[in-house]
Amino acid sequence: MSKTKIILGCFDDPDDMMQGITNLQKNSIPIYDVYTPMPIHGIEAKMGVKDSRLGYAAFCFGCLGLTVITSIVYYTLVGDWPQNIGGKPSFAMPDFIPFMFEWTILFTAFGMTFTFFAATHLFPGRAPRVMDLRATDDRFIIAVDAKGNIPHDDITNLLKDAGAVEVKHNERKYVSYE
Amino acid sequence: MTGKDMTYARITNEILLPVENKPNKAWWIGFIVSALGAMLWVVSISLTFWYGLGEWGLNKTVGWAWDITGFVWWVGIGHAGTLISAVLLVFSQNWRNSINRSAEAMTIFAVICAATYIVAHMGRPWLAYFTLPLPNQYGSLWVNWNSALMMDVFAISTYFSVSLLFWYTGLLPDIASIRDRAKGLRRRIYSILSFGWTGSLKTWQRFETVSLILAGISTPLVLSVHTIVSFDFATSLEPGWHTTIFPPYFVAGAIFSGFAMVQTLLLVTRKVLGLENYITMFHIESMNKIILLTGSIVGVAYITEFFIAWYSGVEYEQYAFINRATGPYWWAYWSMMSCNVISPQLFWSSKLRRNIPFSWALSIVVNIGMWFERFVIIVTSLHRDYIPSSWAMFYPTWVDVGVFIGSIGVFFTLFLLFIRVLPSVAIAEVKLLLKTASEQAKLKQIKEGHLEPAEVQYYKESLTKYDSVDMADYEKV
């Protein structure tokens, strides 16, 4: 029984990596994940990854911000302590628009970004789960789970055919843990 | 992006060069000078806090002077970064990829400087929380949501925090690049800072969504900030301030001064850090064109203001403007006019636009001019009001000067530290250009005969202006 846990196809060109994905998909080999130093356009459709729903989150947080500030302004200046400024109505809508705008933006930005961090498990101090240290530099990595995907040499050949500069059979999943 | 034999690895190596090595002499000299400036700031601001605003040259008539001038100047400078990142991303201008990171950093540091002015100007900065709608013991004396100054509190704080968030989120993949190349303690530090970034498929997809939405909401935010800053003046009844043209005029002026400061910093950074292949003549020329455009808008605004003062028939308004140009502060007015209106017009000449020392000198001139603009608006409008018996002049004390010079020191100290510890160019975004918008990719296309001869000819002619392109490569193709 081989001790290999994960097979990594390391490419030096994103187009070759896309070819690697095609080769694996043609042979019905499931891909664990893909690690790249930059965003690759068109890869989501190829890998069948659904669109991000962060836009909906952003919209909801924006609505929340607007509601919160409108409530604060209304409560303080209209409900709790209305002031007589030249006999004008205390609910001076045009004056409040800048606040409504700013708080909408503020809540949208922070709400959406923190949702992104939470969903992707990004936070200060998280141990990075890196499979190949060059994935943030100049290597485009396709990771295939070794368990159940045999024979391993066939996978190696498929990746090599696509132009992989190196195929690694790693016994540890993550190299970043010391 | 220009340069031969560019690879993904080379991009990482070149951009991380200053981060992964000991600083050179030029950096140390710059850092020591800036740090001395920052020390001056600490001394001046401490005196202000200890003894109060009496340390400044303010008097009963001129109650806002160098403080608000400095504040508006810094906020204006803080506009280019988010403009470059957000507006140009929304419009898919991918040339922004190589300059956005440092421009955003500059924005953040400029807004920090601006915020210190506001806090200092409060006189009793420990009561700064009075600007927040907190329940308190004074009956329920809430904040006044009708006030433009309150709008400013929220505009500046939202702008600062959203810019910081945008900048830091964009930094995550690049911090991960440093982390994976570092050893020991450095690695641990960058590991914490990188939030555990791995660059997996889903991470990148969400990252791109977040970037685009942040850019989309930051675009109106940038425009709102200086609009609201201009409300501080425009909603008053002071002749010279009470002007409906202020919001668009301030926004144009902010972009103008922001791009000038980006030029000031980037032309030097490019040379010192050897980033000629990333920040190319195309960027320099494009930024100079924006300076020309916004400088012209500012010029039109100055003239319109003058015309409207005359056309309004309001004698106080008319006097405020005549007094600006011919009164005791004529020198400030004409410095502003020549620096902001006349000098950018030189950029109509493409030779001057592509001349790096000239562009740098002009960016300094614009920075000076924009400082004078705020000084003219604030001090000349205030110093002669409705009652001639209260007319006065403003004379800065050395603390005023110290706070201003010192804030420049703080700004440069922060910027110099930034280029040492974080990548000054967005590595991941520049990598996107390698196979699309690089000189190398284009040359390959030409050699393989994918382009029309006329197109190739035009391309070759436009390349001659680049200082980082070797034309010898193009002789045979």
Image (cartoon, coloured by chain):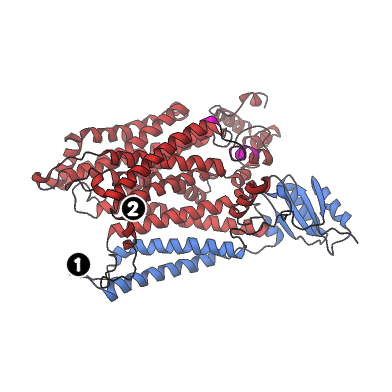
Residue B427 image point, x, y percent: 60, 44
Tell me, yes or no, if residue B310 can be seen here.
no
Q: Nearer the viewer, mark 2 or mark 1?
A: 2
Q: Could you tell me which chain the residue with mark 2 belongs to?
A: B
- Is B211 or B61 nearer to us in this picture? B61
Q: Mark 2 highlights which residue?
A: B119
Which amino acid type is shown beneath numbered disc 1? Ile
Say which residue appears at 62% left-offset and 62% top-offset. A120
Residue B269 image point, x, y percent: 51, 35
Residue B54 image point, x, y percent: 23, 47
Q: Colour of chain B?
A: red
Would residue B227 be found to the left or right of residue B379 on screen?
right
Q: Secondary structure at mark 1?
A: loop
Please, what is the dominant secondary structure of the magenta stretch? Answer: helix
Q: Secondary structure at mark 2?
A: helix
Which residues, given as a range, are shown in magenta? B13-25
Q: Mark 1 highlights which residue?
A: A85
